[in-house]
């Protein structure tokens, strides 16, 4: 695809008289193809399509191709050969290459998904373990047929009633395990014994030592609320990641670049509006322009968050935080407008440049609210695995304003955890896009 789009770009730039002439364009195109293979391999672009988020997979393609173009541009600069190549050709190649790489993967993935859903090209899996564990895994794979796996046999430690047996799945005991696996021609065996079942795991591995199949361990994690779970190898030891922030490693750098670039652009474009709001706040009531509040940031560390002041200056009892409510007498007339349009949050763009917040992330709650709700809502503090944001997935889904019930806060937390589990640059851009509509049409903020 890289070579093909390089040739098409050459045709667009120079016409069809001399394909990839002079010869330096041939070298550039094939160097790009080699770099693409190396970089895509390192980024995991070639991993099985049946695993992970599709948005993240396409994001890896975008990141990888951008790195290829950046490396090629750097090499041409360092070797002083940049003037030997047409910049218009390079631009064509960059655009066509990205479109071709994304389109080819999208089309091939649709074809593979279509085939998998109709039972073609699936890998046969035999599940071995207690039936309570294999039952959920069997149903999960049936729901995600596009993953490329299907359960053909279940070997359990006790008889299973006929009514509980899914159609098309053979059932056997764990006795004579190797023989049973060979009979159904399984491609893989997944052990579902619990972590405390070390003896059963070892016995199953020993029974399969003469059977040429892939063996995996699938621990029962369906009862846990996990974030970004997976497997990481550290010093040659496989580690089962149970709760890892998705914004770490290279993703942390990507998220930081996104925040700094977008915050700089927004501050530049909105600076006249910020100045006008500051004048309006000062004229509406005595007191400072900015309201500073302490909130919990990344990993629960305390940070200072800024907002335009929307209330009359007042004092509250120590440790008490009263949420704003409709027709709250503490809110000034100009402040009501700011809160309704969320313009009071704009100073937090500066907090983003300070590294305290992100453009998108779970909204920071008052310290007293965190202390209160962490006792009532499971996994509440997992919200702090990422930086708090100016806007978030919960807010664009209508969960803005006062959370006067535990159920409302529970729903907000569920949306926040969904965002953390599924984070990507594209997800952030989608939330930013929807924020504009939420600001204009949502009436929950006051």
Image: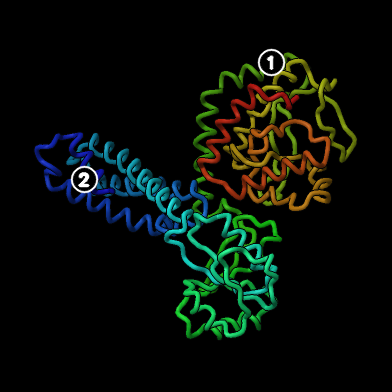
Q: Is mark 1 on a helix, strand or loop?
A: helix
Q: Say how many tags the image has.
A: 2
Q: Where is residue 434 in the image (x, y as percent from the top left)?
A: 58, 30
Q: Where is residue 71 in the image (x, y as percent from the top left)?
A: 32, 49
Q: Position of residue 13 (x, y in %)?
A: 19, 34
Tell which circle, 2 or 1, labels the residue nearer the N-terminal end.
2
Q: Where is residue 93 in the image (x, y as percent from the top left)?
A: 27, 40
Q: Is mark 2 on a helix, strand or loop?
A: loop
Task: Locate the C terminus by quadrant.
Answer: top right
Q: Name the residue under label 1.
A: 280
Task: Residue at the far left: name it.
Answer: 17
Residue 280, compared with residue 230, is above or below; it is above
Does residue 70 appear left or right of residue 432 in this picture?
left
Does residue 316 appear left or right of residue 277 in this picture?
right
Does residue 409 appear left or right of residue 52 in this picture?
right
Residue 358, compared with residue 125, is above or below; it is above
Image coloring type: rainbow
**Residue drawn at the location 70% of the way across and 49% of the way down:** 301
Task: Residue at the far right: name it.
Answer: 317
């Amino acid at each position: 695809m890289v070579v093909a789009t390089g040739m098409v770009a050459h045709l667009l730039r120079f016409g069809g008289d001399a394909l990839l002439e002079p010869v330096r364009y041939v070298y550039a195109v094939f160097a790009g193809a080699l770099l693409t293979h190396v970089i895509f391999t390192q980024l995991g672009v070639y991993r099985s399509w049946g695993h992970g988020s599709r948005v993240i997979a396409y994001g890896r393609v975008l990141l990888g191709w951008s790195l290829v173009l950046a490396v090629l541009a750097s090499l041409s600069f360092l070797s002083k050969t940049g003037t030997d190549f047409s910049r218009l050709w390079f631009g064509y190649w960059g655009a066509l290459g990205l479109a071709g790489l994304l389109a080819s993967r999208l089309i091939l993935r649709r074809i593979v998904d279509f085939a998998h859903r109709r039972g073609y090209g699936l890998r046969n899996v035999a599940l071995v373990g207690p039936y309570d564990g294999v039952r959920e895994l069997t149903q999960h794979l049936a729901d995600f047929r596009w993953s490329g796996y299907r359960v053909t046999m279940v070997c359990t430690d006790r008889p299973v009633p006929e009514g509980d047996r899914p159609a098309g799945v053979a059932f056997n005991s764990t006795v004579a395990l190797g023989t049973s696996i060979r009979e159904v021609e399984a491609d893989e065996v997944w052990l579902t014994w619990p972590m405390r079942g070390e003896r059963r795991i070892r016995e199953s591995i020993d029974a399969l030592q003469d059977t040429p199949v892939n063996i995996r361990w699938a621990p029962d994690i369906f009862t846990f609320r996990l974030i970004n779970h997976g497997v990481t190898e550290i010093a040659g030891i496989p580690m089962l990641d149970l709760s890892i922030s998705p914004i770490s490693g290279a993703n942390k750098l990507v998220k930081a670049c996104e925040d700094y670039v977008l915050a700089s652009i927004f501050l530049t474009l909105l600076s006249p509006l910020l100045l006008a709001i500051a004048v309006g706040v000062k004229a509406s009531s005595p007191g400072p322009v900015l309201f500073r509040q302490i909130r919990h940031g990344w990993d629960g560390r305390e940070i200072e968050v800024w907002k335009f002041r929307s209330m009359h200056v007042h004092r509250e009892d120590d440790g008490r935080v009263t949420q704003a409510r409709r027709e709250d007498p503490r809110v000034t007339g100009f402040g009501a407008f700011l809160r309704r349009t969320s313009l009071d949050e704009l100073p937090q763009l500066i907090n983003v440049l300070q590294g305290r917040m992100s453009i998108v992330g779970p909204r920071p709650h008052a310290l007293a609210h965190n202390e209160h709700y962490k006792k009532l809502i499971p996994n509440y503090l997992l919200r702090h695995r990422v930086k708090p944001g100016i806007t978030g997935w919960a807010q664009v889904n209508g969960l803005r304003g006062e959370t006067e019930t535990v159920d409302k806060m529970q729903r907000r937390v569920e949306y926040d955890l969904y965002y953390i589990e599924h984070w990507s640059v594209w997800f952030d851009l989608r939330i930013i896009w929807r924020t504009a509509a939420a600001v204009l049409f949502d009436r929950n903020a006051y």
